[in-house]
Image (cartoon, rainbow, N blue to C red):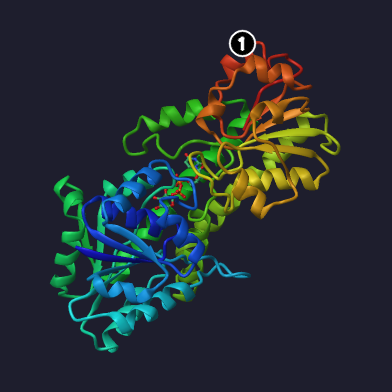
Amino acid sequence: MKISVIGCGYLGAVHAACMADLGHEVVGVDVDAAKVALLSAGTPPFFEPGLPELLRSAIASGRLSFTTDISAVREATVHFIAVGTPQLAQTAALDLRYVDAAVEGLLPHLRDGDLVVGKSTVPVGTAARLAELVRSAGSGATLAWNPEFLREGFAVKDTLAPDRLVYGLAPGDSVGERLLDSVYASALALGTPKVVADFATAELVKVAANAFLAPKISFINAMAEVAEATGADVTQLADAIGYDARIGRKFLNAGLGFGGGCLPKDIRGFMARAEELGVDQALSFLREVDSINLRRRGRMVDLVTEVVGGDVAGKRIAVLGLAFKPDSDDVRDSPAIDVAVRLAALGADVVATDPEALETSRRRFPDLNYVASVDDAVRGADAVALLTEWKTYRALDPTLVGSAVATRAIVDGRNCLDPVQWRAAGGCTEPSAPLNVL
Ligand code: UGA
């Protein structure tokens, strides 16, 4: 298949590289010349495990190229829209201007039989509107909506072997379905379930999935609040309820809560759309989900304040982890960054590190003090706040960390250290210097 991908940010770059890896001929188009230059050189402008290798081999094979020239899409039959839909400033609604511009930019180049495929997360109703736009341009091209469910850190795997494929199609669009089947032939051959639906259902599947996952995290964080008040162990609680197959253990890790470019934005955008549709009551629970989530950040700041004696002003606080989750350099709506910034605002001398997100953090929050290594961060610190559960942080030596930290206190914001091991190792183990677990 000949494919174009409009928008080569996180979603588009991964999608383009994966489609080329599957044997398709792919051109990625983006308005950002610097991004196009980086991608053309085989260097993703963000951190994603496995992507650089995939990108380089696809480019070397001749099946993948990137350009700023939209007319390059003329070679392709299937055109994926993978541009961003950020949250509009001052409101919870999503900004559709990039999606609209991408479709409008495609129109002069479409031919009969072409398929425009939306992948971006959009408010329900958008696909029908854009399908009409494509139809009325008279090229004979049609539109489908094919939401994306990839997770940062697992993006390549999630794209090559997705849990499911969802096609939102106009009634009777068997040509669109056949084209998508050809694009995803290898995933379908693996037995990937396929759901063929109308536009509204396909759009809703995407936000509904995130609106299910976010409450799961806030549920366990609500239990963490109760556990803390009662002395119970929320991790054991999650293990025990997770054995129930109806509940499942995944997404029950209590801690600092969810962040990133998707879950927070999507549940807010979904609420905003529900309000427009007059069904805001149906989603009112998401407001509580959001506030439980945000409360975790405040609780983390309070815990750090407690362990340094009630006031962080002038105290050196080592922050381990800045990315919103491990295996990512993404700091959009990162709970870790939020905590670090709040501590700094309270007068703490924050010294922060992260294996991959130092550059992205520095760009957005130039006023924090960044260091390259854990050793540099913890040396002489009054307390350590572990805010992103990178594998290397899970493997830290409790004795070394403990001996570098004045209060011998580490506040584990991600519940990723074993409190028994850390206390037993003689690092942060003194009764006066507990390992605090969020
Ligand atoms: C999320 C969804 O998981 C994807 O399926 C979806 O495609 C994507 O949003 C999207 O809409 O594009 P992602 O944001 O990459 O993917 O990351 P997640 O793994 O879902 O984590 C989101 C946040 O929840 C992170 O801050 C993570 O630390 C937090 N989290 C996750 C917890 O606090 N506890 C958990 O048990 C799991």
Q: Amino acid at mark 1?
A: Ala
- Residue 338 % position (x, y): 66, 48
**Which quadrant holds the N terminus?**
bottom left
Please report the residue visible at 23 percent of the width from the left and 51 percent of the height from the top. 22
Q: Is residue 294 visible?
A: no
- Residue 434 % position (x, y): 70, 20
- Numbered circles on residues, count: 1
Please report the residue visible at 54 percent of the width from the left and 34 percent of the height from the top. 389
Q: Nearer the viewer, residue 405 or 293?
A: 405
> Does the beta carbon at disc 1 come under 8 Å from ligand 1?
no
> Along the horizontal axis of the image, is 345 left or right of 38?
right
Identify the secondary structure beneath mark 1: helix
Name the quadrant containing residue 250. Answer: top left
**Which quadrant holds the C terminus?**
top right
> Along the horizontal axis of the image, is 255 left or right of 211?
right
- Residue 101 % position (x, y): 43, 78
| Residue 281, placed above or below residue 343 | below
Q: Is disc 1 surrounded by few (<14), some (14 to 19) or many (20+) residues within 10 Å?
A: some
| Residue 353, placed above or below residue 203 | above
Q: Nearer the viewer, residue 9 or 52?
A: 52
| Residue 14, placed above or below residue 409 | below
Q: Is residue 371 visible?
A: yes
> Along the horizontal axis of the image, is 220 left or right of 435?
left
Residue tagged by mark 1?
424
- Residue 52 % position (x, y): 40, 45
